[in-house]
Image (cartoon, helix red, strand yellow):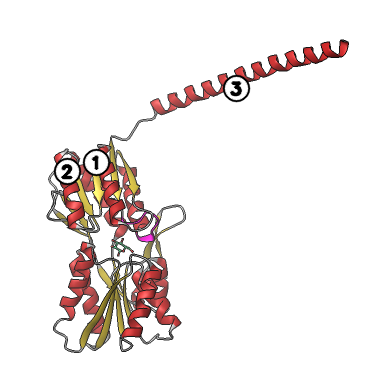
Amino acid sequence: MRGRLIIYVLLIATLIGSAFLSLFYYLEVKNYEEQMLDIVAKTPMPAHHLVLISEELDHEYWKLVEAGAKQAEDYYDVFVEFTGPQNSNQDEQVRLLEMAIAKRVDGIIVQALNDELFTPLINKALVQGIPVVTIDTDEPNSYRISYIGTDNYRSGKLAGHALIADLEGEAVVGIIANSLASTHMQQRVQGFKDAVEDEPGIQVVTIEESNNSRVGASEKADKMLKTYPHITAFYGTSALDGLGVVSTVTALNRDDIYIVAFDTLDETLALLDQGKIDAVVAQEPFEMGYRSVGIMLDIINGKEVDKVYHTSTSIIRKEDLKNGFQIVNDYGQVEIRPW
Ligand code: BGC
């Protein structure tokens, strides 16, 4: 009997204890929530919310664009939401554009990869009062207000002229583009072809797509060399294509093959330094990201802007590396790295 009484007392004490504990935690959480709401309410929100839609989220080239846009946040009263597909995918990019329109953001900065898919949506955004700036790849037939980025046709020409100069007008060329459905890739290929057109010693024998993957580029280079073993040069039209070609050429012991690649990624510059890549078309992705935000804010504030802002594009070779190149460090800051 006494034993039972003790059990009942213990049980009731435990119940009362846990009720108190629950009440205590409930009040703590409530208090914390109230404090957080207070902090959020007191934190000034940036005046404008922009979205920047890239080709690939986790890509070294696009990280430079992002770093540029984020640096602009320090100077303007703006929040830039940087987004893009995990892996290059035009349909996914279009879906992100649709989402940005549905969210009614204050401005959209988008890489307009393909006329057919992107123009209707860019126009839809404009009709709904959301200004659009294209970046990296333009869509001049749409209602986009401005473009910031490389003159892609000219960049292809630069690559062609570099190859002509370095190989003294003699080459059998294979081209690897990330996607032939993308406007900028078509322009980079066309610019190259136009540059070499009047060179009787230069022949473009084949063009393949890498699907914006270094493995893809490597496989295509391998396939091309099996079909056209007399290839003496490769032109990789986007950031990962040249890297893929180097893997294949190295594996096949064909270091004699000339490679002109795109973009100053760390690895590409290291390969240029080692003589595995011969020339690189350097773009200005950080600058594109940074200036795109300023242009968009000018538009929002009713200022006049140009229709096209071309960032600089140049050819670099091994000997140019001593001047150093911009990279994004582990803290997301841009530095000039000396070589
Ligand atoms: C292009 C980007 C592209 C990247 C992919 C760059 O050369 O300008 O549009 O997303 O390469 O690797």
- Quick check: 72 left or right of 251? left
Q: Position of residue 228 (x, y in %)?
A: 31, 86
SS category of the residue bearing label 2: helix
Viewer-closest of 21 and 282:
21
Q: Position of residue 213 (x, y in %)?
A: 37, 66
* Residue at which label 2 appears: 124
Position of 322 relative to 45 (above/below): below
Dot 2 or dot 1, earlier in sequence: 1
> Dividing the image into four equal quarters, which quarter contains ligand 1?
bottom left
Determine the main secondary structure of the stretch shown in magenta: loop
Q: Are discs 3 and 1 less than 8 Å apart at CB?
A: no
- Name the residue type under label 3: Tyr
Look at the image and give the residue range highlighted in magenta.
55-61
Q: Position of residue 109 (x, y in %)?
A: 25, 48
* Residue at which label 1 appears: 101
Dot 3 or dot 2, earlier in sequence: 3
Position of 306 relative to 22 (above/below): below
Q: Which mark is residue 25?
A: 3
Position of 187 relative to 132 (above/below): below
- Name the residue type under label 2: Lys
Q: Which mark is residue 276?
A: none
| Residue 133 visible, this angle | yes
Q: Are discs 2 and 1 less than 8 Å apart at CB?
A: yes
- Name the residue type under label 1: Ile
